Image: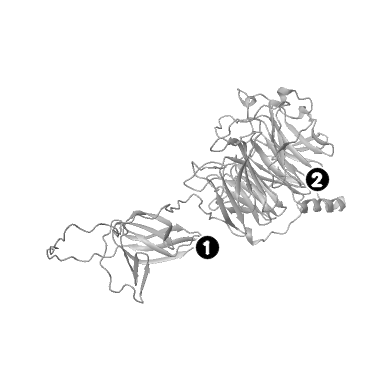
Amino acid sequence: MRRSRDIAAALAGLALLLPAAAQAEPTWRLEQPAPPAGAPFKVPLGAPGDLDFYAPDRGLLSVEGNGAVPRGLFFYDGVEWRQLSTVCGGSGDTSRIAWAGPDEFWVVTEPSRPRAGQGLALCRFRGGVVVGSFSTADGAADPFRQMTSAACNGPDDCWFGGSGSQDATGQRVGAFFLHWDGADLRTVYDPQGRGVSDLEWVGDRFLSSRLVGRRPGDPASADLAAPEPFGPRLLRSFGPGRTGFRNESYATVGATPADAEGRELLAVSHDGDDVWAVGGGATSGPASVGDPPSARPPLAVRLAPAGWQELPLDQALFEPDELFLDVASRPGSPDALVAAATAAERSQTTAKARVVTLRADGGAEITRLPVAGSGRGAAARVACPAVDECWMVTVAGWIFHLTDGAPRARNTDPAFASRIDQRPNEAAEQFVPDAPPVDDSQLFAPPPAEAVQPVAPPTTVVQAAKPLLQRVRSRVTRKLVLIVSFRVTRTGRVGLVATRRGKVVGRVKARTLRPGNRSLRLQLSRRRYPTKLAFVTPDESRPAPDASTGGDDTVTTGDTVTTGDTVTTRRIP
């Protein structure tokens, strides 16, 4: 499914010049990451979302995780796989990866809490950190829809495709896309309406494979595809930076109109020379309904010099309901590697994986993995980053490597040296009032009708209460999170208000805190960085003025007075 870069093509040409005796025959072997902490043996990683390589020593794998492995991303450095990120993970059905540069990539993921939903958010990684996290709130004017595919043509042209849907007003209807232009994300709807199963940059345009209709039990993917006179069009393309979608038709092999309605494409791949698309019997639309669903043979299409052509597969090699789930073009070869499974095997974690080598003439060779021993799950994802080097990940999360065993230098790029466990929370509440506060100064109030003689209050002795907050400290993290720590002397409600030039730019709502060491956190913004901070203590009475206020040892922040290690908070009406 994934494309290989120019470096892989150059390696392919170089390998063809080497003597045949100098190259060992590539074989498949299991290459699992080291066991997680506390585990005595290597373990599966959970259902894979995507497998993508920028270079042979620069690969990414997104996994759903399990009880032993947290969901997130694994990185291959040319020697071994290790966990790169424990944030921006997602389910195996929707998590997708798109490389935008050697140290920059995007991930289709889930929103930050309290928002939720598979495939409804994006994370942007660059230089070893998550530099952007994007999702929309419920009821947003232009909401994100579920995304299941991703591809980039450099850092300033990335696309993310998803289900058939419509905007909040119902005016724009079709397959949902998000486009990153280097500065902003904007929504685009392809009016054809068929959901996007995969997306790939193929040298001069973006190519997308399409589903026939709505998947059973999936209310998020609306069945909005309009009937087409010559059957469903399952390949659609558009130019870089543009939204002019067009069909890419292919010549079918003995398919009737009924067959066309019951088939769909699930994956595309490009290696610099060849473009492949694969699929089979529809997992969506009317043909997917029934018990069992209508069986169709697997489907493979290839872009040849004469145009797109369906390959004449030998159906005797395959089961009647076998699906081609993923495809990887092999650099330096006209062949492709395919992950295949029957409908019954597709979710089995103990089945033996079926890996198919497809030739340009339709010939096929099937390999069952592992070659010996019990099964480790049906094949789910494949990638081929170099000549005679391919990868396959099973639905359980076991990684197999096709290699000749030649050693490779370790990639020491610092962007992938440390585990990433922080992500900006795009869903955090940021309260900014739309109007100034109510004027309670009584500046224009009428004078009192008559002067009232003040009555001397009875003499009482009031013992000053101990300040609510003491030992106040603050710091700002590299992620622009302000952390204010303090000691609470008695149970009370404490909040925090950040202002800039008199306007509120951030707020932590008042909450009840028990005595002890406590802290408040506030996400800051460089463009709206606060100049003053104030504690809010709704349950506290206003203290008498402090004679030391304004002295050299006193710091005044809004309505907060700090003297030594004690903070006196003044009530904000």
Q: Camera-side residue: 558 or 258? A: 558
Per the rendering, the mark at residue 478 is 1
Crowding near pointer 2: few (<14 within 10 Å), some, many (20+)? Answer: some
Q: Camera-side residue: 151 or 18? A: 151
Return the x and y of residue 532 as percentages of the image width and height. 41, 64
Crowding near pointer 1: few (<14 within 10 Å), some, many (20+)? Answer: few
Per the rendering, the mark at residue 541 is none
Q: Circle 2 is placed at which residue position?
A: 273
For the question of whether residue 544 can be seen, the reply is: yes
Quarter the N terminus occupies: top right
Horizontally, residue 515 falls left or right of residue 218, namely: left
Horizontally, residue 326 falls left or right of residue 307, namely: left
Q: Residue shown at 79%/32% (left/top)? A: 311
Q: CA distance from mark 1 to mark 2?
A: 44 Å
Among all residues in the image, which is located at the extreme bottom?
A: 552
For the question of whether residue 326 can be seen, the reply is: no
Q: Residue shown at 12%/63% (left/top)? A: 458
Q: Camera-side residue: 162 or 67? A: 162
Return the x and y of residue 477 as percentages of the image width and height. 49, 62
Task: State the SS at label 1.
Answer: loop
Three-letter residue code for mark 1: Arg
Number of marks: 2
Horizontally, residue 546 falls left or right of residue 484, namely: left
Within the image, what quadrant is residue 370 found in?
top right
Q: Is 301 above or below relative to 573?
A: above
Quarter the C terminus occupies: bottom left
Q: Which of marks 2 and 1 precedes in the sequence?
A: 2
Three-letter residue code for mark 2: Asp
Return the x and y of residue 426 as percentages of the image width and height. 51, 51
